[in-house]
Amino acid sequence: MTRKLEIVATPTPLVKAERLSSELGIGLYIKRDDLAGPTFGGNKSRQLEYYFGAALAEGADTILITGAVQSNFVRLAAAVARSQGMQAIVQLEDRVPGKSTAYRSSGNVLLARLIGAEIITYAHGEDEEGADAALHAKADELRARGRTPYVIHLSEGHPPLGALGYVDAATEILGQSDDFDFYVVASGSGSTHAGLLAGLRGAGSKAKVLGSCVRRDAKAQAPRIRRVTDRLVQLFPKAEAVTDDDIVVWDGALAPGYGRLGPAGRAAMGRMAAAEGLHLDPVYTAKSFAAVLAHVDSGDIPKGSRVCFVHTGGLAALFAYHEDLTV
């Protein structure tokens, strides 16, 4: 049986964006998962409930995890580890070249240091298997010293425990409102997107789930979501209900690439802030809300539709993007 550590105070709010709803001609609701978990929370808190459940079941005293320099995932993992009396080792990849000293020292990096995480680096940003291998080598060193480490994997090929967090979120949202026509969510590692989609289909919902690509283009991302969903069947058999036609991804705001802000993302940040006083982050939510705006403009989200935008958080990273956001 899969063990779960309760991290998120549920349900997180589901609120109507009144002004944007009026401006766009849709019923726009925001699932406030930016409020999920520890300070500067986010969607990864739901995933960590299952990873920490497994780690505690194994008697782990140390968590090892890889992410980008401004990863919310690693910062949240470090925070949860400390709350459980565990050590945290976070491995930061260089996924976004050419960034400033502020990017490499503020935001999530600063918070992880304040938490007391041990920070190590991995030079490559597109080598998931290599990053995991480096963590396993570190874990072997810890075991030799009598420690009990637990590795949260970055690469594919492992049971997608984190996706179960968004199977839970789907059930939660349906309990708050079960008549959405569209869900829009960031699509990166795939666990949040695949888990939400599987949870909805498993519950019988036929709503369209649109994943906005934040790390790789649509051609590469759609097969990844298929693979995550297929592996999820081992943990959540109802994921079998997900068909290829259910996997919808859009990469219109991806440029100029992961962790870099383009015109569509910048416009989405400004639109949300001006209309609702709510901030989006440059890496995930700016690009996912850009998908809402683009699909309303194209008519792919028809007027009158009810839309759930999943705000996945990431707001600590705003401070690392000061130079990008003030030019």
Image (cartoon, helix red, strand yellow):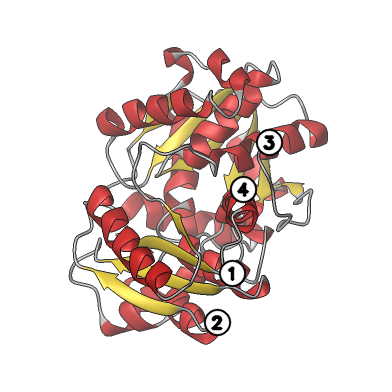
Instruction: Point out which mark residue 50 bears.
Output: 4
Hey, what amino acid is under mark 3?
Met
Tell me which numbered mark, 1 or 3, is placed earlier along the sequence.
3
Cα separation, mark 4 vs mark 3, equals 11 Å
Mark 1–mark 2 contact, CB under 8 Å? Answer: no
Instruction: Point out which mark residue 1 bears.
Output: 3
> Quadrant of residue 25 in the image?
top right
Residue at x 53% of width, y 25% of height: 234
Tell me which numbered mark, 1 or 4, is placed earlier along the sequence.
4
Left or right of residue 63: residue 45: right
Cα separation, mark 1 vs mark 2, equals 10 Å
Tell me which numbered mark, 4 or 3, is placed earlier along the sequence.
3
Please state which of the two labelled residues, at mark 1 or mark 3, is closer to the viewer: 3
Hey, what amino acid is under mark 1?
Ala
Instruction: Point out which mark residue 81 bears.
Output: 1
Q: Name the secondary structure under disc 3.
A: loop
